């Protein structure tokens, strides 16, 4: 461990230290605002140190972590997402009884797990990152443990995530017994069919087990069953965290090490990904059609979106990594915005996430309803939004690899998806019901922090939808070394 | 010279027998020879000369899961410390700094849980214990 190693790790170190400081500050004196401020400051310091870390990268730190442009880019994304979640969580938790402060400590730890995951180049760090993320999420999902649904969601997630971790671990053991290496780069070579590298039965069994573990975290069909219940039960800021940081970091890891790079096409692993992609797109969109709870609806739609991402993932060529990264970025911005708006609206002790609660929202809260509409349109992939360009790039990547069947499924399922997004839009803009009793957040009381982060998300949504060139160039730069 | 295992251990057997005879003889002797007085004071549990108060069936919370967490906290520390001691001389200063950091983290966790009133088992009417009581009542409520 040299000084440069520490510099390269500085964002991660600062983030972990912040979690510790927040915890100690709670022990000394509880104060919601202070905890949130400390968390924000820590995230900002960590974000600022990215530039510092960039001066010594690319660098392999201790055989476990690989810090390069790709890592730093995703670190920046994760830290920014975490900061937005802090702002949203602050206004959300203000209305909840019980302790609010620990949320930030756990959230920072979950983010640190995501950071480790993105940087990991070794099975040990992969598993560690996985666990830091999961264990924090167990507590975060069941954070409002006095209510029935969060507790139920927390226990469900605990049981399933622990099982999936066991799958992952067993898969790693089998793969290690076959390949004799825990380095992900070596492992990836086996899939690419490098000379003198063929997997035996144990290796393939290990691959399937690892796919199960990773598929669970990404919530792709057939490992998606936990998604709606956990999304619905978890407090809204946690749901946003699961949808963005948890999935984003796992996908970034997958994209870096197992992006097929052409030579994988036609192999069994490739087919597994193709089938998961097609099944996720179809099942996610079809199951979302008849949901009456907006959180469940977005949960099913997230399954479909992971399917879209997988299309770019299985596509070969230089475009694929960039398309997947762009799509992922567009998706996390959009879904964070959608959950953020919901968390601002659901200001009571009870969350109002039924579709009917949103009837006529536009006539009560025009700005928030308009923002929500923008998010939904981006999820549906309507032009001018980041979601459209993301989907466009994914299509382009798929077309350049001639994945016609997958593209057909993508187009067909997107059309299905349009129906339920528009269904929510119709509800938002329809007239107020006669017996209107449920009062959403009274006019003009969006908390400053949450309002700021929502405004930034909406602006980013349109900037990335209208003027993609700078981001696209940045992504091209960081993804040059991989894939 | 003793040759077999039985011969080797014979003195031990002898020692055990003598010990049993002496202990049995003393207790038995005082039982048969001594005179007995029974009264209420004498039948009370002897606790260092203090007069016992209350009922032995008083209930108090063991807070098993918090104690379990504390146990894990220090168990993990011990698990890391043992191998660390073995390789300490090869790793030198780096290992020392890393272990100090690790122990600081563990102690920070301990400080947090302490301030939360986990060590305060007799929590009633005590400010510091209120957190723990609330946690506990929440548990019962949730169950």
Image (cartoon, coloured by chain):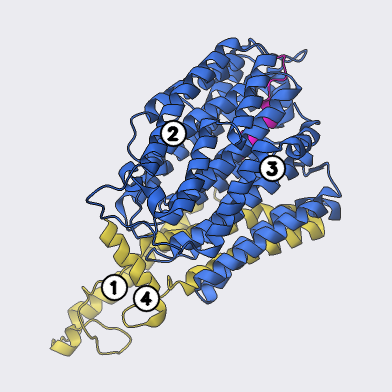
Which tag is nearer the camera, tag 4 or tag 2? Answer: 2
Image position of B94 (left or right of B10): right
Q: Does residue A476 lie above or below A232 as drawn?
A: above
- Marked residue nearer the N-terminal end (4 or 1): 1
Residue nearer the viewer, A441 or A162: A441
Within 10 Å of disc 2 (Cα), the crowding (few <14, some 14-19, many 20+) is many
Q: Does residue B22 lie above or below A69 as drawn?
A: below
Q: Does residue A48 lie above or below A121 as drawn?
A: below
Distance (Cα) linking label 2 and label 1: 92 Å
Within 10 Å of disc 4 (Cα), the crowding (few <14, some 14-19, many 20+) is some
Q: Which residue is mark 1?
A: B25
Q: Chain of mark 1?
A: B
Residue B19 % position (x, y):
38, 67
Who's the residue at 21% across and 83% down the image?
Answer: B54
Distance (Cα) linking label 2 and label 3: 29 Å
Residue A3 is at least partly visible in this image? yes
Q: Tell me whether circle 4 and circle 3 mark residues in contact (CB < 8 Å).
A: no
Residue nearer the viewer, A241 or A293: A293
Image position of A475 (left or right of B63): right
Q: Chain of mark 4?
A: B
Q: Which residue is mark 3?
A: A74
Q: Which residue is mark 2?
A: A421
Q: Which residue is mark 4?
A: B130
**In the figure, residue B20 lies in which quadrant?**
bottom left
The quadrant of the image that shows the C terminus of chain A is top right
């Amino acid at each position: 461990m040299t000084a440069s190693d520490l510099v390269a790790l500085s964002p991660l170190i600062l983030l972990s230290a912040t979690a510790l400081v927040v915890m100690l500050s709670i022990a000394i004196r509880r104060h919601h605002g202070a905890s949130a401020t400390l968390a924000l400051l820590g995230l900002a310091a960590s974000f600022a140190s990215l530039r510092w870390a960039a001066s010594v990268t690319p660098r392999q730190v201790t055989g476990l972590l690989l810090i390069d442009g790709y890592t730093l880019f995703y670190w920046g994304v994760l830290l920014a997402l975490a900061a937005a979640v802090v702002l949203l969580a602050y206004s959300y938790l203000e209305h909840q009884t019980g302790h609010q402060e620990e949320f930030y400590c756990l959230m920072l730890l979950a983010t640190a797990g995501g950071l480790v995951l993105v940087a990991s180049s070794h099975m040990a760090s992969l598993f560690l990152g996985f666990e830091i993320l999961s264990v924090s999420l167990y507590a975060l999902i069941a954070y409002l443990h006095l209510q029935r649904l969060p507790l139920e969601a927390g226990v469900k997630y605990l049981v399933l995530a622990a099982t999936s971790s066991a799958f992952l671990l067993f898969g790693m053991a089998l793969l290690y017994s076959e390949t004799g290496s825990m380095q992900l780069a070596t492992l990836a070579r086996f899939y690419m069919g490098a000379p003198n590298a063929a997997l035996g039965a144990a290796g393939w069994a290990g691959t399937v087990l690892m796919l199960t573990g990773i598929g669970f975290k990404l919530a792709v069909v057939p490992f998606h069953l936990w998604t709606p219940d956990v999304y619905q039960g978890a407090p809204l800021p946690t749901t946003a965290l699961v949808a963005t940081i948890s999935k984003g970091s796992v996908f970034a890891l997958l994209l870096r090490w197992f992006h097929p790079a052409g030579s994988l096409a036609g192999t069994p692993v490739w087919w597994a990904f193709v089938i998961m992609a097609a099944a996720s797109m179809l099942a996610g969109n079809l199951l979302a059609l008849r949901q009456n709870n907006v959180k469940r609806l977005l949960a099913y739609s997230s399954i479909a979106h992971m399917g879209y991402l997988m299309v770019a993932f299985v596509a070969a060529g230089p475009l694929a990594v960039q398309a997947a990264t762009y799509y992922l970025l567009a998706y996390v911005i959009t879904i964070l915005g959608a959950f953020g708006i919901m968390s601002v609206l659901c200001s009571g002790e009870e969350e109002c996430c039924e579709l009917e609660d949103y009837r006529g929202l536009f006539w009560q809260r025009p700005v928030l309803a308009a923002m929500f509409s923008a998010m939904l349109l981006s999820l549906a992939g309507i032009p001018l939004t980041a979601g459209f360009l993301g989907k466009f790039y994914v299509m382009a990547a798929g077309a350049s690899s001639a994945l016609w069947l997958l593209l057909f499924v993508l187009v067909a399922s997107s059309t299905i998806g349009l129906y339920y997004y528009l269904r929510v839009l119709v509800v938002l803009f329809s007239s107020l019901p006669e017996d209107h009793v449920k009062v959403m957040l009274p006019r003009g009381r969006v908390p400053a922090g949450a309002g700021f982060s929502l405004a930034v998300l909406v602006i980013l949504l349109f900037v990335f939808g209208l003027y993609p060139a700078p981001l696209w160039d940045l992504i091209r730069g960081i993804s040059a070394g991989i894939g | 010279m003793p040759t077999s295992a039985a011969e080797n251990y014979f003195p031990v057997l002898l020692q055990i027998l003598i010990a049993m005879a002496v202990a049995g003889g003393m207790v038995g002797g005082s039982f048969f020879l001594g005179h007995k007085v029974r009264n209420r004071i004498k039948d009370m549990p002897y606790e260092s000369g203090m007069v016992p108060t209350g009922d032995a069936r008083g209930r108090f919370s063991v807070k098993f899961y918090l104690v379990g967490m504390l146990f894990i906290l220090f168990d993990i520390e011990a698990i890391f410390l043992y191998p660390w001691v073995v390789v300490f001389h090869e790793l030198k200063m780096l290992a020392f700094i890393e272990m100090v950091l690790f122990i600081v983290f563990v102690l920070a966790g301990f400080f947090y849980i302490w301030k939360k009133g986990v060590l305060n088992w007799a929590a009633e009417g005590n400010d510091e214990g209120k957190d723990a009581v609330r946690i506990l009542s929440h548990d019962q409520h949730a169950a």
